[in-house]
Image (spheres, rainbow, N blue to C red):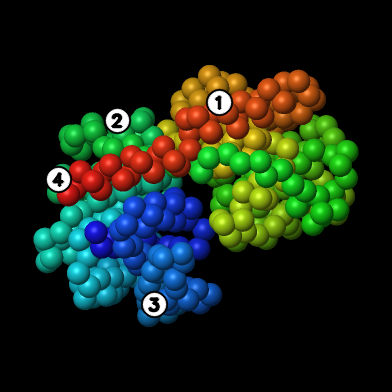
Amino acid sequence: MNICMFLMTEFTHDARVSKEAQTLIGAGHKVTVIALKSKHTKRYEKRNGLSVIRIQLKSRYLLPKAQLFFFIKYLEFVHRCIRRAVLENFHVYHCHDLETLPIGYLLCKIKHKFLVYDSHELYVNTKKHNPVARIIWYLIEKSLVSKTDVNILTTKSRGEVFSERYRVRPPEIVMNVQHPVREMKNDLFRQHFSISKKSYIVLYQGNVVPGRGVDILIDAIGYIKNSVIIIMGQGEYKEILREKYQKEIEEGKLFVLDAVPWEVLADYTSSADLGVSLVQNDCMNNYLMLSNKLFEYLAAGLPVVFPDFPEWHELILKEKVGLTVNEKDPESVAQSINKILGDSVLYQKMSDNAKRIVKEKYNWSIEGKKLLNIYNNLRS
């Protein structure tokens, strides 16, 4: 099948889209990703058999970033995507997140092909929308999800909310996990920053933006024993952190660096000793999430410290791979980190459990087969 995926980002660090595309290519499908072009990305690109086309928006740099102007830019993106995609004979339009669903729907009305909606999150329940925008997106999603051939979500709890909200059949669940574990422990962080082997490395990786609890983690530095903190990811908020925590950086307790390509991300992750995420409970989407960040840490054999949200509570405590905490309390976070890093027997047990469950249950070999089954059922 000839598959067109739509993604309203620059498609530089989206591991989920890359994994799905490569799985489909490996099964004999042809995949093209149509994404958004920035000043620093190529218009056309080829990655291991995957074709990437990026759409240049004239309005993107002419108009301010305010919510009002977003919809003008969005309409240009929709228009240009349809004009580009309609030229080729695609069999499936695979829409990543709600922003691209109208594109796939309109193309299906023109070309009469299959429509797959792959929602990485509960889009209308994210914090980024103002009340008016949230209502608009809700109405768009409500009107279109019953017209897809299949809906895909990332967690069972999100799927339940989605199904009940729109009164549609339960969506397929394809978790955002990693490839099977492999032995890859190295010292990239220590070598790059000259970190002493006597210090543990506590890692946060992901988008560095407000609401991810990065400040809470850094505020815990004073309570964490024999450790340094590394913040690795993309986002303009990094510069604010560098200015706010200049003292900690100068003292060698905190290191802030840019995101690395997802192809080498696992090598960097495995250079740490413990993985942390303190995303804040400021919307339903966050509260019901089971982020790829967790599985990136586990695949590298890192014990984890995460908020005590339902999906994380069940997996982390049941599988004994880390601890859950009050994501707003730096002292609580530090106590959990100290408990894991200060007990070598507990640490090794959690690390072994992490590698085991990724190998046996939570890996892309399993989830990728679910995706292939979805596509096989489209044909029948």
Where is residue 283 shown, x and y percent of the image?
43, 38
Q: CA distance from mark 2 to mark 1?
A: 21 Å
Where is residue 133 shown, x and y percent of the image?
32, 53
Q: Is residue 96 visible?
A: no
Looking at the image, is mark 4 or mark 2 nearer the viewer? Answer: 4
Query: First in sequence: mark 4 or mark 2?
Result: 2
Q: Amino acid at mark 4?
A: Ser
- Can you tell which mark lies on residue 160? 2
Q: CA distance from mark 4 to mark 2?
A: 26 Å
Where is residue 50 shown, x and y percent of the image?
40, 65
Q: Amino acid at mark 3?
A: Gln
Q: Is residue 370 visible?
A: yes
Query: First in sequence: mark 1 or mark 4?
Result: 1
Query: First in sequence: mark 2 or mark 3?
Result: 3
Residue at mark 4? 380
Dot 3 and dot 4 residues touching (CB under 8 Å): no
Residue at mark 1? 316
Residue at mark 3? 56
Looking at the image, is mark 3 or mark 4 nearer the viewer? Answer: 4
